């Protein structure tokens, strides 16, 4: 595990890319791969850095038909809802 952590420390974040962008990108990659728990971890990290739930939802939906089929996008949206509920992440009221 120490070698993995060392590798991640060398690679993350890449030069000239902020950590927020990296967390968004990792969450989207994990959604495509169908990796629920790691997706939730990185989605919550993105949220903690100021990304909104609506922004993550929009990014998941814009991948539909390209990198995600409807079922996969819907599943990732459910995971996002669950992650927010599990951590009591406040979300803006729907208008």
Image: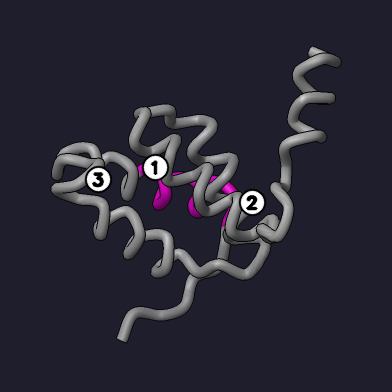
On screen, residue 70 above or below 89: above
First reached walking from the N terminus: tag 3 or tag 2: 2
On screen, residue 39 above or below 85: above
- The overriding secondary structure of the stretch rendered in magenta is helix
Query: Helix, strand or loop at disc 1?
Result: helix
Q: Residues within 10 Å of mark 1 (few under 14, many from 20)?
A: some
Closer to us: 7 or 1: 7
Residue 58 in percent (x, y) is at 32, 64
* In this picture, residue 8 sits left or right of residue 77: right
- Please tell me which residue is depicted at 70% across the width and 48% down the height of the picture: 14
Residue named by callout 1: 79
Please identify the quarter of the rendering in which residue 93 is found: bottom left
Q: Quadrant of the N terminus?
A: top right
Residue named by callout 3: 73
Which one is in front in this view, the residue at disc 1 or the one at disc 2? 2
Residue named by callout 2: 45
Residue 82 counted in the magenta span: yes
Which one is in front in this view, the residue at disc 3 or the one at disc 1? 3
Residue 16 in percent (x, y) is at 70, 60
First reached walking from the N terminus: tag 1 or tag 2: 2
Q: Which residues are magenta?
A: 79-88
Query: Helix, strand or loop at disc 3?
Result: helix
């Amino acid at each position: 595990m120490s070698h993995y952590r060392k590798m991640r420390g060398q690679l993350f974040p890449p030069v000239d890319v902020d950590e927020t962008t990296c967390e968004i990108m990792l969450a989207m990659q994990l959604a495509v791969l169908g990796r629920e728990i790691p997706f939730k971890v990185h989605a919550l990290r993105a949220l903690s850095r100021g990304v909104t739930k609506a922004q993550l939802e929009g990014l998941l939906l814009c991948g539909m038909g390209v990198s995600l089929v409807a079922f996969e996008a819907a599943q990732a949206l459910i995971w996002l809802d669950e992650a927010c509920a599990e951590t009591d992440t406040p979300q803006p009221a729907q208008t």
